[in-house]
Amino acid sequence: MKRRIVSTLLIASMAATMLAGCGGKDAGSAGGNAAGGNDAGSTGGAAAGTEAGVGGAGENTAGAVEPGGWDGETTHIVMTYLTLGNTPSDVQKVQDAVNEITVPDIGVEVEFKPIAIFDTASQYSLWISSGEQVDLMMVAFTNLATYADQGLIEPLDDYLASAPYISSCVNDEGYPLFDGSYYEGEVYGITPVMYYYGTGGSLIIPDEYMEKAGIEFTEDTLSLDGIGEIYGKLKEAYPDKYPCGLVTKNMTATVYNQFGGVFDALGATPSSGVLMGTDSTTVENLFASEGYYDYLKHMKEWHDAGYVYPDAATTDSTANELTKSGVLLTESMTNQPVMLSDFSSATGFPAKQFMTSDSYYTAQSSSGGTFWTVPITSTDPDAALRFLDYTYSNHDLHNLILWGIEGEHYEIADADNLLIKFPEGVDGNTSTYYNTLGLYGDRRYEYVWDASNDKATNEAYTKEAMANPTKAVGYAYNTINMATKIANVDAVLTQYLPTLESGSESDLDSMYEQFLADLENAGINDIIADNQAQFDEWLAQQ
């Protein structure tokens, strides 16, 4: 039971940070996490009988569909509908509204198959092995190679002709919708178009703390020493609080990237090696690098100076909780624009976002992403891809599936910015259709509960990041042959990272040397060699 609870919380956390284009439980009044702006050229979601908008406001009209223009037979498909454990009571009503659009437009009738996101890993294989019809299956945070290797999902290359909008997003606009889904050279999954792409590090500081500590905002990139100087000013102004907003208990992955570390995990995790910087083609052990050790030394110095919360490696509280209660003075995050809005929404503090690295663009992850797949039990893969493509090209349809019916489940608050709110008397707890997993379509055109991160801001961030790619964009390491050794490496990280990255070890050098030795004993060098061989083969084909 304990393991299930931990897994549930972990997946829910990943879903919240990677998927949600959502508001909080009272998003209509207080504002929630932004999904990116939207100028799809319509002012409301497509309820039953409304005319659907097609194409990306002139940006991508591939596969434009004539409303009501289908004159062939209707195909019934089954699509997974992921939740965080509670199925909205109006799923059937929204499903009916969807079908009033898709049956006359593209000849597809869809049936939603609700399932909690943390049950997918155990249930999907059972469904497929029993021959149950599932035509579109969302695989989240699981390596697609596992499904492809077992022959549970179809390669999609032969069906992409039924998805012209998706194909145009990839071929004409350059979005990585297939990256992380390749297995033996074929495409097995399609991601939603995200409202931003790229990564980097940032330090977020509430305005009131900056003012009292005399900290001026700068657009210059902060070094570790620069971060330390800010921590020092904050500590002087608030001697009973802790400037470094880091909680490391249960840490299983490094947050070095949030403190300026630039690396590419090659579509996997640092457990299997990384490229350091954006110009390298050599797979190496991140944890043995000079940059990572320098980061640990700074964490040790900050801990000893009283900048780090003393219980960072043991507390059950989250960083957001400790910041909201006034214990922590900053938080380190990745540097996408949405993170500032997320911070302010979660803590209640207006704040500034300082960059700790430039934005850059990496290989897309399979195990850390979300992919629409077609199981081998699909009765009509072409119809499945036709429906999937329409959820991308028809932004009203996308928003209907995501947020429900206008006037019942949300209202338009700002038509120009496509900002929505709950109807009067409704919130996230009482709504009959509120599911925050943004798994659908072209998310650049998604309704938002908070307009602070608009489409233009997110597209500018994406453009900057894509102009600074690593050498591995388009590659994803196939971890299957090294799965056991990767699990062993992950166990070592779980053992050491909470202490090392909180700076709380009194003898850093001794623990660090033992950490590296244990990583080698777990097989990290063998994994890196396997990854390098695959990467070299991939590079040779480019």
Image (cartoon, grey):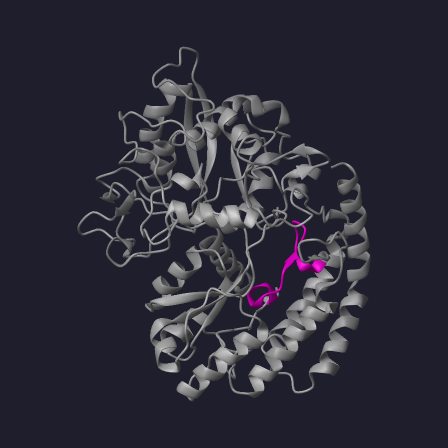
Count of numbered marks = 0
**Residue ID at (29%, 55%):** 27
Q: Is residue 474 left or right of residue 308?
A: right
Q: Is residue 200 above or below residue 73?
A: below
Whole-percent x, y for residue 384 in the image? 50, 26
- Which quarter of the picture shows residue 72? top left
Q: Quadrant of the C terminus?
A: top right
Q: Is residue 253 magenta?
A: no
Q: Is residue 259 magenta?
A: yes
Whole-percent x, y for residue 442 in the image? 44, 37
Whole-percent x, y for residue 242 in the image? 46, 82
Q: Is residue 133 visible?
A: no
- Which quarter of the picture shows residue 228? bottom right
For the residue pair 102 and 69, the one nearer the viewer reads as: 69
- Which quarter of the picture shows residue 356? bottom right
The part of the chain drawn in magenta is 256-271
Q: Is residue 281 left or right of residue 303?
A: right
**Residue ID at (29%, 44%):** 417
**Residue ID at (29%, 25%):** 51
**Residue ID at (66%, 50%):** 470
Whole-percent x, y for residue 292 in the image? 67, 70
- Looking at this rendering, what residue extends furthest in the left direction? 424
Q: Is residue 370 above or below residue 224?
A: above
